Amino acid sequence: MLGRRKKRNKLPGRLLVVAVLVICLVVICVRYSNMKKEKELAVTTAINSANELSQGYFYEEALQVLADSGYEAEEKILAVQQEIETQQATLTEYDGEFYHVFFHSLVVYPELAFDGDYKAEGYDMWMTTVSEFQAMLPQLYERDFILYPMNLIQKDQPVMLPAGKKPLIISIDDVNYYDYMEGDGFAERLVVDENGEIVCEVVTPEGKAELSYNGDVMPILDQFVKEHPDFSFRGAKGVVAVTGYEGAFGYNFIKAEGEEKQKLMDEATKVATALKNTGWLIACHSYTHNDYFKDGTVSNENLHYDTNRFKERIYEVVLQPDIYISPFGYHLHEGDERLMYLKNMGYDYFCPVSTAMRTLYTKEGVVISERFNLDRYNMRNQKKFINETFFDVDSVYYKN
């Protein structure tokens, strides 16, 4: 009897062992399943990040993401790595011309800009509307233009692009939102949203202030590049040029004082920082935009006065630009002491206006990048050239 009892008592112990083994097995299976899911998620995340980077031609960065994933030997990772390396190998040296076009701040509400007052004629000549700019972009994209960073244009520096692509530089003059433009259908200022992106503050024809992502070139182009990342080489957007006599980006800190002055300067710097962080470059467009620049005969004295004013009052606020966009598009040529002066003041790029859109490398070490204005005047008077080079004018032009 005693022996039987001992035999019976072993059964619960065996059940306990079995239960523990089952629990361990379940834990191992769950852990394995979780590890498998984590691995799949990590591989998918790395692949998605690498593909997103490669779409904007950040090939080295994309390959680094795959290498840092911890799963670089995985078949899926290796396949994506090979695909990106193949894409990178297709880059070819571009030996054609650069295309540099420029705009002024866009007309948001044509009914306010083209209202027949004394400013309407000027707006109708030198400005472009939001709808016109939006209509240009898909055609530029379809004609194989690709946004290219001006600060990568250097003498003897090869330009590597996908075959058939043509480098495009877009610059915008007078991004100041001057007092004289108030109430004429333009944006009022640039603002940084909660995601660090540029948005425009506009006032509707009804007098309501609101934020808009369609208020000027910058947010419109930002959105287009998001939708078409292959339109931008390594995140390039364009060049934003400011004068100084009314501050920058809609923040007129020049006449302000004390805390108000500092607050406006800080807001302008916040905008400049957001622009740079999202692929934009910033340029000096002179301080005064004075009439003495008009015919290209600006004296050394006036140029020094103007450039020093910019240096003293706005240069640091807009993060020390090294691009000089000439007011009224005046030219300076190799050997001109004024060009050397600008170089010594920190400007490595000089951008005048010319339909030829030549890129010249001077002995002073300055890159001259000539620009063509895609405004309403040229859409009327240079229609054939624009049709052949950039887009179909009739499908773009706003008829007021």
Image: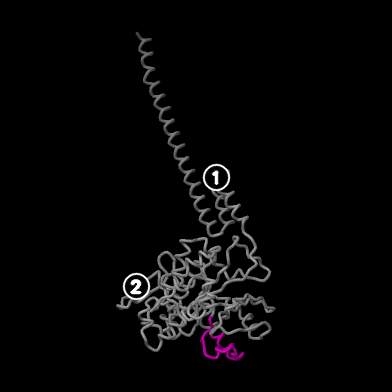
Q: Of helix, strand and loop, which one carries label 2?
A: strand
> Which of the 4 image quarters holds residue 297?
bottom right
Vertical side of 185 occupied by 167: above or below: above
Query: Which residue is at 41% across, 80% downward?
Result: 259
Q: Are marks 1 and 2 in contact (CB under 8 Å)?
A: no
Q: Nearer the viewer, mark 1 or mark 2?
A: 2
The magenta-colored residue range is 285-309
Q: Earlier in the sequence, mark 1 or mark 2?
A: 1
- Residue furthest left as drawn: 206
Query: Which residue is at 58% across, 71% downward?
Result: 150
Residue 287 painted magenta: yes
Disc ID at residue 71: 1
Disc 2 marks a residue whose amino acid type is: Glu
Query: Mark 2 Cα within 10 Å, few/some/many (few <14, many 20+)?
Result: few
Query: Which residue is at 56% across, 77% downward?
Result: 371
Question: Percent position (x, y) of residue 341?
Answer: 63, 84
Q: Quarter of the image containing the C terminus?
A: bottom left
> Which of the 4 image quarters holds residue 311?
bottom right
Question: Percent position (x, y) of residue 268?
Answer: 46, 76
Vertical side of 205 occupied by 303: above or below: below
Query: Which residue is at 56% across, 80% downward?
Result: 353
Disc 1 marks a residue whose amino acid type is: Tyr
Disc ID at residue 295: none
Question: Percent position (x, y) of residue 135?
Answer: 44, 69
Of 320 and 87, the residue lying toward us: 87
Count of numbered tags:
2
Q: Of helix, strand and loop, which one carries label 1?
A: loop
> Which of the 4 image quarters holds residue 307?
bottom right
Marks 1 and 2 sit apart, C-alpha to C-alpha, by 47 Å
According to the picture, the residue beneath numbered tag 2 turns out to be 210
